[in-house]
Image (cartoon, rainbow, N blue to C red):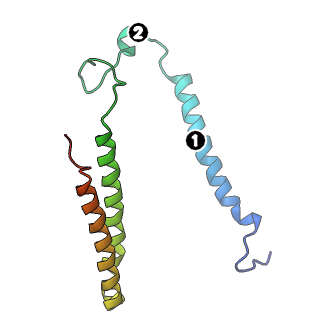
Amino acid sequence: MEHLQGENLPVDYIPILIQMLVAAGFGVTTIVATHLLGPKVRTENKLTAFESGIKVIGNARQPFSIKYFLVAILFVIFDVEVIFMYPWAVNFREMGMEGLIEMFIFMGLLLLGFVYVIKKKALNWD
């Protein structure tokens, strides 16, 4: 069959479909096998909550402070911003002065966002 460049034919997606079926089949097979082959004895000791060798005290569903989530989201945002700097650092010489100016603009906006976060006292735990 003559393959035209730039056209996606349905036959081109067969390897992706096969890979998805193998992955789904592996997942389903593993889950079914563990249920069929695994131990069936359920004792009180096995069903008790256990974490790091310490007996659980209190309710596990107590609410977290919103500050925890805010700091976590800010960390992810600033972490992603740092990831955008890596390709620039790798291609620093090829980009020349234009790339340097663009990175200063990017860093300025990043610093502006950080100043905003500090002014809003989003990182204070009190």
Residue at 30 percent across and 53 percent down: it is 75
* Quadrant into which the C terminus falls: top left
Can you tell which mark lies on residue 26?
1
- Neighbour class for label 2 at 10 Å: few (<14), some, many (≥20)? few
Residue at the far front: name it: 119
Can you tell which mark lies on residue 43?
2
Residue 109 percent across, percent down from the top left: 32, 70
Q: Amino acid at mark 2?
A: Thr
Residue 87 percent across, percent down from the top left: 36, 75
Residue 90 percent across, percent down from the top left: 32, 79
Residue at 34 percent across and 54 percent down: it is 76
Position of 49 with respect to 30 (left or right) is left
Name the residue nearer the viewer: 29 or 60. Answer: 60
Find numbered disc 2 in the image and state the secondary structure of the residue it sits on: loop
* Quadrant into which the N terminus falls: bottom right
The answer to which image quadrant residue 49 occupies is top left
Residue at the far right: name it: 1
Name the residue nearer the viewer: 55 or 88. Answer: 88
Q: Amino acid at mark 1?
A: Phe
The answer to which image quadrant residue 110 occupies is bottom left
The answer to which image quadrant residue 118 occupies is bottom left
- Indicate which disc, 1 or 2, sits on the residue closer to the N terminus: 1
